Image (cartoon, rainbow, N blue to C red):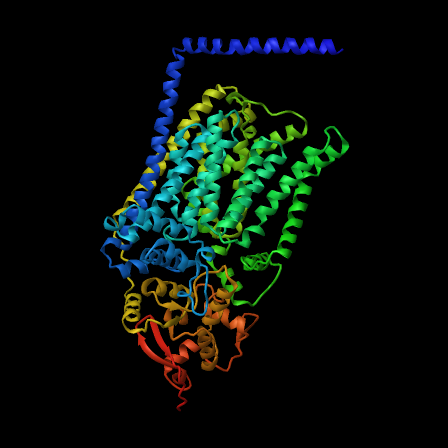
């Protein structure tokens, strides 16, 4: 019996070696018949790679130039004074750029970093580690590059800063180009991806609203990581290409984690996608677990470099990765073909989820953490699991980015033809993946190499990964409109890949059992014709609009804010502390350098409480209550914004003053009627009347059409 089996194996080896020897000869004969020598094929492949890379890099550079030109036209940036330029940075963006300025003003880089990690000149009565709390690694890198490159005599700091961000957006577009190219095999898909990305710029990026925001620094690295991961998951990848992709995944994952405080949540979604991919045995397990090790390395490295950031230790990503590694090692240590091993394969998903949830619960019990707790409370209220009158929670729920997406969002994607093609591609890929999973359950192995005529696009692991990933991101985007900036770029990439991929059309024709025309020929024709038609129609309809954007001169001018900042710099004492809305405080900190009592940041419980307390200047509270709140933070000046005090919002109940009244119990809503229960008038209105007791606590020192500035009296004079 054993000798017969040995003879059979020997004959198989001989047959396989003979067939291996015949393959190159047959290929050479076919090539010679077609008039294509191996040298010709090599030149053709090199030309395709060269022109594809050239197109990718050119697309990224042109997008960066487009952003720079649009920004110049929108703000007249080069024609403004420094103060007017800085006013264009709003909210949290103003805070990030202010620290970049402080680093450049420091006598040395080391001294600048020390002052940021022991910062007591930004928020009154509070010493903060700004590098950790505000993730200032982008500003550290930008300041080092600015000083090390000798750019002080060549370019102004603000142009260098926004130039880096625009350059990163160019890399973002290039990475999306490469991803669709790798998936489809043609760089025509990359061109279509870039076209859809730029046309739908309102929904693909927030670069217009806040240039220094963390996601604008971080998402280009995530796009590079996704591109490298796409190549890494491919079958039959040569050794050097696989090693390059692995190293790029490593570097980009770690950099992405260092650039954005919420990066580990996005990586968690990616890890879930890979977990599902591995659970159905649609990818090489070794590769998937190598990516898990990269996550683990990045989390540990990020924890150490981010001053022992406990948020990374209690993150769901760490719990999931540890659970996956533990469950897999448990399976590998079991003897094969045993009942326990088979049972573990069936219960693998349940085991991973149980271990991950248990581990995360234990970590939160033993590791002190306060970061991002408000996110969990927000999710509870958002899902209807809890109700609250808390001002901060209700204010977050009223933010447009945290609402469900509007109909206009879907209408814009449909008008650019992106959404219909995305749905078509997603349905075809999803059905093909479902077929592959069903075959795996039935015991049919995957093919080592999938040919075009097979029509099995669902057997390619990188395609399955992107299908799962885009579905998960899409579910998040359907709940929170702000998540569309993560989802829509990959919608552009997946839709462009699909219409340019002959394999996708061949998969569709296999189901339709097309016989009238040769399916392979038709698939090749459609993969060229459809994107060409789409590109031509997009060019005809949207190119004139884009050119109009670049030629129109838009005027952004805010004289009231300029006057306020000028007055503060000239009249206010250097040691003064200002109080007001967090968004305005960020601009005051950037433009004047004066200390403030609050910041537009929402990752710290103390800052959230400060914001809520200082917002009371727009509530129905007494002058004495407001005075006690402001003096508790050592504030010297109070700035009241007329736009908030007299706000007429489109959604009644989401205005700042309405949320404050609800939180303070000053308004009760019954069957659509509002009943006021406060014996005091609204503070921001009453203080403008200049009568007692308001004049006893506050003295008006400056005002214009938008702002009223009051000095907080240190000596209270009670006069009638």
Q: Locate residue 434, reporting x and y percent.
A: 60, 33
Q: Quadrant of the image for the C terminus?
A: bottom left
Q: Nearer the viewer, residue 363 or 232?
A: 363
Do we see residue 176 in this rendering? yes
Residue 2 is left or right of residue 168, and the answer is right
Is residue 249 positioned above or below 399 on the image? above
Residue 275 is left or right of residue 602, and the answer is right
Q: How many marks?
A: 0
Is residue 520 positioned above or below 530 on the image? above
Residue 11 is left or right of residue 665, and the answer is right
Q: Quadrant location of residue 223?
A: top left
Q: Nearer the viewer, residue 444 or 2?
A: 2
Do we see residue 428 in this rendering? no
The residue drawn where x is 30% and y is 47% is 68
Residue 643 is left or right of residue 339, and the answer is left
Q: Nearer the viewer, residue 115 or 661?
A: 115
Is residue 519 positioned above or below 577 on the image? above
Q: Quadrant location of residue 84?
A: bottom left
The residue drawn where x is 46% and y is 80% is 681
Q: Quadrant location of residue 561?
A: bottom left
Q: Locate residue 289, reporting x and y percent.
A: 58, 36
Q: Locate residue 452, reporting x and y percent.
A: 50, 22
The residue drawn where x is 61% and y is 11% is 13
Q: Quadrant of the image for the N terminus?
A: top right
Outermost residue to the bottom: 720
Q: Nearer the viewer, residue 385 or 534?
A: 385
Q: Locate residue 569, reporting x and y percent.
A: 29, 69
């Amino acid at each position: 019996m054993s000798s017969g089996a040995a003879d059979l194996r020997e004959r198989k080896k001989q047959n396989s070696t003979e067939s291996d020897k015949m393959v190159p000869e047959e290929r050479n004969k076919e090539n010679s018949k077609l008039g294509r020598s191996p040298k010709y094929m090599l030149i053709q492949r090199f030309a395709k790679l060269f022109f594809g890379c050239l197109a990718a890099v050119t697309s990224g550079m042109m997008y960066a130039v487009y952003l720079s030109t649009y920004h110049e036209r929108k703000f007249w940036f080069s024609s403004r004074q420094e103060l007017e330029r800085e006013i264009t940075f709003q909210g949290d963006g103003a805070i990030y750029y202010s620290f970049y300025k402080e680093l450049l003003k420091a006598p040395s880089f080391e001294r600048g970093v020390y002052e940021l990690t022991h910062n007591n000149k930004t928020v009154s009565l509070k010493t903060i580690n700004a590098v950790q709390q505000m993730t200032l690694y982008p500003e550290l890198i930008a300041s080092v590059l600015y000083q090390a490159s000798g750019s002080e005599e060549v370019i102004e700091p603000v142009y260098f800063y926004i130039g880096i961000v625009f350059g990163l957006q160019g890399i973002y577009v290039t990475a999306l180009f490469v991803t669709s190219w790798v998936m489809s095999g043609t760089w025509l898909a990359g061109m279509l991806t870039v076209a859809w990305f730029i046309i739908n710029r309102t929904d693909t990026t927030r670069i217009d609203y806040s240039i220094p925001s963390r996601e604008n620094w971080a998402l280009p690295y995530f796009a590079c990581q996704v591109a490298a991961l796409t190549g890494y998951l491919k079958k039959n990848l040569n050794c050097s290409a696989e090693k390059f992709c692995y190293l790029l995944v490593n570097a980009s994952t770690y950099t992405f984690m260092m650039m954005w405080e919420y990066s580990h949540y996005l990586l968690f979604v990616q890890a879930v996608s890979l977990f599902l991919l591995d659970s159905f045995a649609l990818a090489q397990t070794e590769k998937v677990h190598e990516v898990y090790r990269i996550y683990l390395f990045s989390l540990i490295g990020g924890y150490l470099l981010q001053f022992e950031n406990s948020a990374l230790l209690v993150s769901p990503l760490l719990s999931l990765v540890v659970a996956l590694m533990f469950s897999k090692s448990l399976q590998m240590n079991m003897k094969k073909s045993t009942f326990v091993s088979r049972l573990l394969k069936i219960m693998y998903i349940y085991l991973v989820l149980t271990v991950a949830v248990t581990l995360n619960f234990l970590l939160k019990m033993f590791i002190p953490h306060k970061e991002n707790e408000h996110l969990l409370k927000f999710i509870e209220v958002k899902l209807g699991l809890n109700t609250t009158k808390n001002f901060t929670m209700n204010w977050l729920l009223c933010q447009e980015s945290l609402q469900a997406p509007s109909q206009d969002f879907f209408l814009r994607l449909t008008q650019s033809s992106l959404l219909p093609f995305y749905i078509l591609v997603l349905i075809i890929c999803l059905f093909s993946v479902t077929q592959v999973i069903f075959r795996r359950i039935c015991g049919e192995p995957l093919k080592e190499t999938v040919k075009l005529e097979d029509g099995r696009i669902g057997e390619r692991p990188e395609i399955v990964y992107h299908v799962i990933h885009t579905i998960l991101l899409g579910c998040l985007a359907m709940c929170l409109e702000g998540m569309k900036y993560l989802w829509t770029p990959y919608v552009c990439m997946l839709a462009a890949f699909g219409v340019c991929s002959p394999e996708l059309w061949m998969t569709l024709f296999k189901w339709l059992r097309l016989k009238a025309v040769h399916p392979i020929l038709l698939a090749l024709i459609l993969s060229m014709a459809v994107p060409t038609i789409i590109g031509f129609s997009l060019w005809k309809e949207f190119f004139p609009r884009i050119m109009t954007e670049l030629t129109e001169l838009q005027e952004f001018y805010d004289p009231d804010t300029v006057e306020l900042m000028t007055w503060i710099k000239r009249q206010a004492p250097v040691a003064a502390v200002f109080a007001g809305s967090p968004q305005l405080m960020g601009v005051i900190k950037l433009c004047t350098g004066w200390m403030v009592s609050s910041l537009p940041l929402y990752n710290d419980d103390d800052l959230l409480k400060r914001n809520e307390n200082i917002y009371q200047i727009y509530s129905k509270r007494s002058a004495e209550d407001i005075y006690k709140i402001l003096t508790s933070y050592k504030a010297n000046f109070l700035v009241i914004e007329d736009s908030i005090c007299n706000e007429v919002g489109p959604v009644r109940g989401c205005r700042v003053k309405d949320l404050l009244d609800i939180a303070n119990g000053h308004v009760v809503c019954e069957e659509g009627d509002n009943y006021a229960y406060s014996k005091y008038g609204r503070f921001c209105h009453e203080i403008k009347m200049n009568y007692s007791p308001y004049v006893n606590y506050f003295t008006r020192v400056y005002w214009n059409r938008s702002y009223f500035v009051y000095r907080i009296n240190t000596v209270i004079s009670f006069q009638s």
